[in-house]
Amino acid sequence: MVQFRALDVRSVQCGELPLSIHTPPMRLLLVMVVCVVFGAGCARDHDADHPTEPLTLPVTTPFHTDTTVEREFVCQIHAIQHIELRALERGYLQNILVDEGQTIRKGQLMFQLLPTVYEAEFEKAQAEVRLADIEYRNTKSLADGGVVSASELAMVHARLQRAQAEASLAKAHLSFTRIHAPFTGIMDRLHVRNGSLLEEGEMLATLSDNSQMWVYFNVPEAQYLNLMQRKASGTDIPVHLKMANNTLFDQQGRVTTIEADFNNETGNIAFRATFPNPKGLLRHGETGSILLRDSLHNVLLIPQKATFEILDKKYVFVVDANNVVHSRPITIAAELPHLYAVAGGLGPTDRILLEGLRKVRDRDTIRVHMMDPEKTVRSLGLTAE
C-alpha cells in the first residue's frame, strides 16, 4: 500500500518546487495542482504591481442649437374623385365606347345598353299622354258648358297628370341605357364586355379624377399638438411626398383636413393633405411617405454613434470630472441624419464619450481627448454604430 506524506504548502514558493523524480504519481498530481493555483496568484500579484494605462478616447459635449427635423409618415394616395360606374337598368350591353386607361371627358358617352324595350315603353307612355290629353280637353269643353261637374273635370285632369308622370319615368329609364361620364377622369379596368346581360346595379368600371390627390396619413398626438400650435400662429403646414421609388414628388402639398377623433388603440389622428397633380403622375391607390418638416428650438444634438441601446432604451457614457465613465439613459426627441435631438437625460455641459464605446465599461477611467461639439456635428459623414 502506497503511503503519502503531507506536503507543507507554506514551504512551496512561486517558481520553486522541491520535487524528486521518485515522487509517487498521486503526490506528483497534488503538487502540480498546488503549483497551478499559486502560479496564478503570483501572476495576479505581478499584474497588480504593473497596472495597464487608461485609454485615450475622444469626448465631446452636446451641441446646443436650433434645427429643423423632417418627420416621415406612411401614407395612402387617393384621387379627389373615385367612383364606381354601375348599370341603372337591366339589359344587354350593346356598346362599350371607351377603353381602359383612357382619359374621359365630362359628358362623354361610355356605355350603351340595348334600348329596344325601354323605347317601346316610352312610346307607350307618350300615347297614354296623348289619350289623356284628348279626354281632358273634351271634358273641359263640357264643363265650360255646364254639362259635367268641376269634380269630374278635376279627375280627368289628374289622369292626364299621371300619364305625363309615367311618360317622364319611361323617358328616364330610356336615358339610363346611355351612361355618360359625370366628370373628367381616367377609366379603370372594364368588368364587362359587349353583349353581357347586365343586372341592375352591376359594376361596369371605375372612374378616377386625379387632377388633385388626397393623401391620408396618421400623426401621433405630440406631433399633432405641435402642428396645431404652428397653425394657430398663422404658419402654414406644407408637406412633401416621397413616392415608392424614394424620389420626391415635384409638387408641394398642404394639410387641408384633420379628422375629429383620435384612434384610442394607436394614439394617432388622421390628416389629409391635398397635392396638385398637373401631369397625372399620381394614381389612385398608390402609397408613399409624407415628409413633414418641424422646427426644433434650443435642442441638444449628439452623434448617433455616441449612443448604445439596451432593451429599447438609448444610453450614453458620461465622463465625470475625474474622467470616469458612467452609463446614463437618455430620451430622444427626434432623429436626424447621423444625429439625435435629446429631450432628456443630458445637459449642455455634460461630457459624453464619442467613440470607443465597446472598449470601456461602466466606471472605467479614461484619458480625455476633448473634441469641439460644433465641428463634430458638422463633420459627421457616417451612420451610427
Image: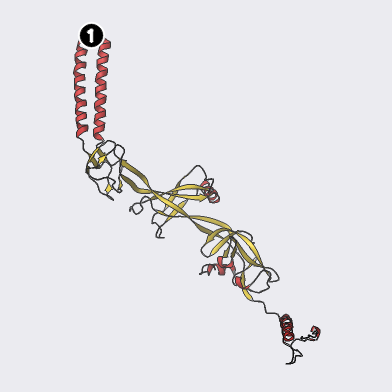
Quadrant of the rendering where the C terminus is positioned: bottom right
Q: Give the left or right position of residue 216, taking residue 168 as reference.
A: right
Q: Give the left or right position of residue 132, taking residue 74 as reference.
A: left
Query: How far from the left and from the top, in percent, is residue 150?
Result: 26, 10
Q: Secondary structure at mark 1?
A: loop
Q: Nearer the viewer, residue 104 or 377?
A: 104
Where, by quadrant of the figure, is residue 360 drawn? bottom right
**Image height of 332 relative to 126, above or below:** below
Query: How far from the left and from the top, in percent, is residue 88?
Result: 29, 36
Q: Amino acid at mark 1?
A: Val
Residue at the image position 24 percent from the left and 34 percent from the top: 175
Q: Looking at this view, name the residue that lies furthest to the front.
A: 1
Q: Evaluate whether residue 236 shows in this view.
A: no
Q: Nearer the viewer, residue 378 or 360?
A: 360
Other-residue count near label 1 (Cα within 10 Å), few / some / many at <14 / 14–19 / ≥20: some
Q: Evaluate whether residue 331 shows in this view.
A: yes
Where, by quadrant of the figure, is residue 1 drawn? bottom right
Query: How far from the left and from the top, in percent, is residue 61?
Result: 62, 67
The colouring scheme, among rainbow, by chain, secondary structure or one colour, is secondary structure
Q: Nearer the viewer, residue 147 or 255?
A: 147
Q: Give the left or right position of residue 381, taking residue 40 as reference.
A: left
Q: Looking at this view, name the residue that lies furthest to the bottom.
A: 21
Q: Total label count?
A: 1
**Image height of 169 relative to 26, above or below:** above
Query: How far from the left and from the top, in percent, is residue 247?
Result: 40, 60
Q: Which residue is mark 1?
A: 148
Q: Give the left or right position of residue 368, taking residue 236 as reference.
A: right
Where, by quadrant of the figure, is residue 129 drawn? top left
